[in-house]
Image (cartoon, rainbow, N blue to C red):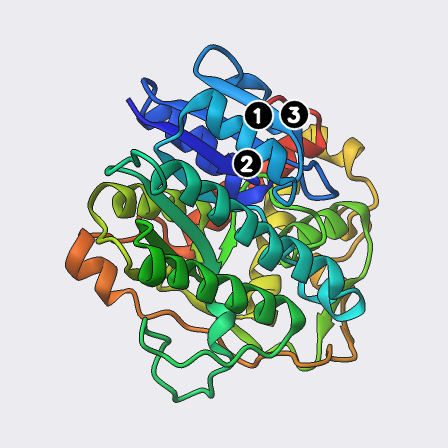
Amino acid sequence: MKKILVTGGAGFIGSNFCHYWVAQHPQDKLVVLDALTYAGHREYLAPLEGEHFVFVKGDICDEALVESLFAEHSFDTLVHFAAESHVDRSITGPDAFLQTNFMGTHTLLKVAKRHWLDGQGLAGHRFHHVSTDEVYGSLEADDPAFSETTAYAPNSPYSASKAASDHMVRAYHHTYGLNISTSNCSNNYGPRQDKEKLIPLIIHNILGGKKLPIYGDGLNIRDWLYVDDHCYAIDLILAGGKTGEVYNIGGENEWANIHIVELICDLLDKKLQQNPAYAQAFSASPVFNGGSARDLITYVTDRAGHDRRYAIDPSKCHRELNYHPKETFETGIVKTVDWYLEEALGVES
């Protein structure tokens, strides 16, 4: 039985990871530490709470709190999701990103080192750090996808803070011998994502008949990873990944932002017309007013430092862990839209 500390477990990827892990490894104990900022939702974890699942509200920068949790629960594994992650917010307020993403990570590393290396130590420990493809910078259309050996070139305060945390995690392995692994993932999508992110924002704006803001020409390209595939990959890394290694997790789904928006528009127009309950609940949506969701698309000024393309080369995960994503974008987006429709109607999920 593993005893796992999950930081940021009430956020988007963290909450999905908790649901995944409880379903796949019900014998393990999970303790979630989350500050419940704007992107944290404890209600997403309510169905899991019990003898093997504990929630603690708190900040990863609170060293005394982290120390007390390690002492109480004797963790052997830490999966670190907690981060400020919205690029726009990092541009207007970078301090919070440095505090949480870098200093918070360092706090966790310090406490983990004391419990797992100092004194008697714990040989089988693992500190898994969840990072992003944005640390690698931007790609041109014909450039090869990011690999684990791609040089770091962060272009926003968010990606710079994540790059700094990646380097500190690596340093704790090479300097002190901490058993670490790092995963750099592409853009995640799926249930429970905060509504300021592209896909849930587009869905909610269509349901409310609001404009769909598209940065620049809309042709910025991202590799999209369904969140459950991400959780599955982390499971494989914890089970078979090598200590000290970095693994790039991709969805093998490169899409331009405008094409994603158009796909969601067409999908929602069709789904909204299939259920009479939607006509009353989402009457402001264009499909109920003689139009289509595409009518809401509005191009806005591009944001500063907007990377043109991200793409992940997941061949190392294929080769060493036999990881392959289970969802295509077309199948994953249907599941995602259905979840947000149910949430908007107040259906428990």
Circle 3 sits in a helix, a strand or a loop, which is it? helix
Identify the residue at image location x=64%, y=45%: 61
Q: Kindly identify the amino acid type of the residue bearing the numbered disc 3.
A: Glu
Looking at the image, residue 52 sits to the left or right of residue 9; the answer is left
Q: Please tell me in which quadrant of the rendered image residue 257 appears.
A: bottom right
Q: Is residue 179 visible?
A: yes
Contact between marks 3 and 1 (CB within 8 A): the answer is yes
User: Comparing marks 2 and 1, which lies closer to the viewer?
Assistant: 2
Residue located beneath label 2 in the image? 9
Circle 1 sits in a helix, a strand or a loop, which is it? loop
Identify the residue at image location x=46%, y=67%: 133
Crowding at dot 2, Cα within 10 Å, few <14 / some 14-19 / many 20+, comes out as: many
Q: Kindly identify the amino acid type of the residue bearing the numbered disc 2.
A: Gly
Q: Residue 102 or 209: which is nearer the viewer?
A: 102
Contact between marks 2 and 1 (CB within 8 A): the answer is yes
Residue located beneath label 1 in the image? 45
The CA span between labels 3 and 1 is: 5 Å
Q: Residue 81 placed where, x, y %?
A: 51, 46
Residue located beneath label 3 in the image? 43
Q: Residue 154 or 333: which is nearer the viewer?
A: 154
